[in-house]
Image (cartoon, coloured by chain):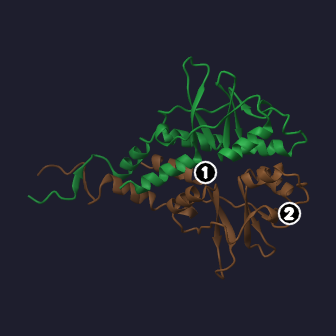
Chain colours: A green, B brown
Amino acid sequence: ARPRVGYFYTGKSGKQLLAEKVMKLTVKQYQSIPVVVKESSSVYDAICTMFLEDVGTLFVVDESSSLVGILSRKDLLRASLGKQVLETVPVNIIMTRMPNLTICYKDDLIIDVAKKLIEKQIDALPVVKSSDGTSYEVVGRITKTNITKALVDLANDE
Amino acid sequence: ARPRVGYFYTGKSGKQLLAEKVMKLTVKQYQSIPVVVKESSSVYDAICTMFLEDVGTLFVVDESSSLVGILSRKDLLRASLGKQVLETVPVNIIMTRMPNLTICYKDDLIIDVAKKLIEKQIDALPVVKSSDGTSYEVVGRITKTNITKALVDLANDE
């Protein structure tokens, strides 16, 4: 019999293997630490937090630490152009608020998050957990940077 | 003889196939149209252009349309916090300028661009071409959004 070296059985094409590999990546493998501000914070303080923490998206929480809104760099840039005094405007005036937020969970697939980021034209999603199904605690942050890292990992994974 | 169905010869593992597929993606397959402003433009006009064109990065060019700088949303947000009058400050005061720019070419690999974006902590690279090796014409823009789309394409490609 001819040697079997170099043969293997899968029943699948190389393309299918690739797609399956991509389909196994989950949020919890790639998520970053979330940066949150209170809804009573000023726009000025939020901008300072964004620079200090070097993130592009802030999550806004209420007194019980539940997610109530999201602030992007774009939201803050728009606000900074206005005539208002940034030190006195609270972030809950300019944030995108529940229920218009796109969220995800730690066991979600990276590929589904990637599709949501493209479809909604946003930079990041909060990774949340919920004990009651109505309020959400922010436990992570997943961004286009995390997705980019996932692609680099796929190329390095031989 | 036993049927050969389901067997194929590659001499490579599934992981190698995956990595090779990722390694074939090039900038020209995924680049977007670049948005440029002149170096004499005001910071205010640049912010307006960023919102009108709905991009996160602007490329700054001189009178002969050569790349001289890059403006990120972060640069513009920082400038908007200052005491200056945005209508009178030219963008060349606040932009990141040559030779401190990271650039790429249309035949570069997506994976190399992804690594640069992560390493430099930036959102986008200009895709350039050069006829003389010293000045660069901007012909495209490649962002973390484009990279995210590449990952989605890999998953869909069965």
Residue A3 position within the rendered picture, expressed as x and y whole percent measured from the top left:
13, 59
Circle 1 sits on which residue?
B145
Q: What secondary structure is found at the residue carrying circle 2? A: loop
User: Which residue is the extreme one toward the top?
Assistant: A132
Q: In screen coordinates, is B1 left or right of A98?
A: left
- Comparing A35 with B12, the one in front is A35
Q: Say which chain tag 1 marks.
A: B
Decide: marks 2, 1 in contact (CB < 8 A)? no
Do we see residue A55 in this rendering? no
Nearer the observer: mark 2 or 1; the answer is: 2
Name the quadrant containing residue A135: top right
Image point 71% across, 52% down: which residue?
B56
Which is nearer the N-term, disc 2 or disc 1? Answer: 2
Image point 56% across, 42% down: which residue?
A115
Q: Rounded to the nearest whole Å, what is the CA distance between mark 2 and mark 1?
A: 28 Å
Name the quadrant containing residue B136: bottom right
Q: Say which chain tag 2 marks.
A: B
User: Which residue is the extreme one toward the front?
Assistant: A52
The three-letter amino acid code for the residue at tag 2 is Pro
Q: In screen coordinates, is A4 left or right of B64?
A: left
Circle 2 sits on which residue?
B90
Residue A100 position within the rendered picture, expressed as x and y whole percent measured from the top left:
69, 30
The three-letter amino acid code for the residue at tag 1 is Thr
Residue B29 position within the rendered picture, expressed as x and y whole percent measured from the top left:
55, 60
Residue A39 position within the rendered picture, expressed as x and y whole percent measured from the top left:
74, 29
- Comparing B50 with B31, the one in front is B50
Is residue A43 positioned above or below B16 on the image? above
Q: What secondary structure is found at the residue carrying circle 1? A: helix
Other-residue count near label 2 (Cα within 10 Å), few / some / many at <14 / 14–19 / ≥20: some
User: Which residue is the extreme one toward the left?
Assistant: A1
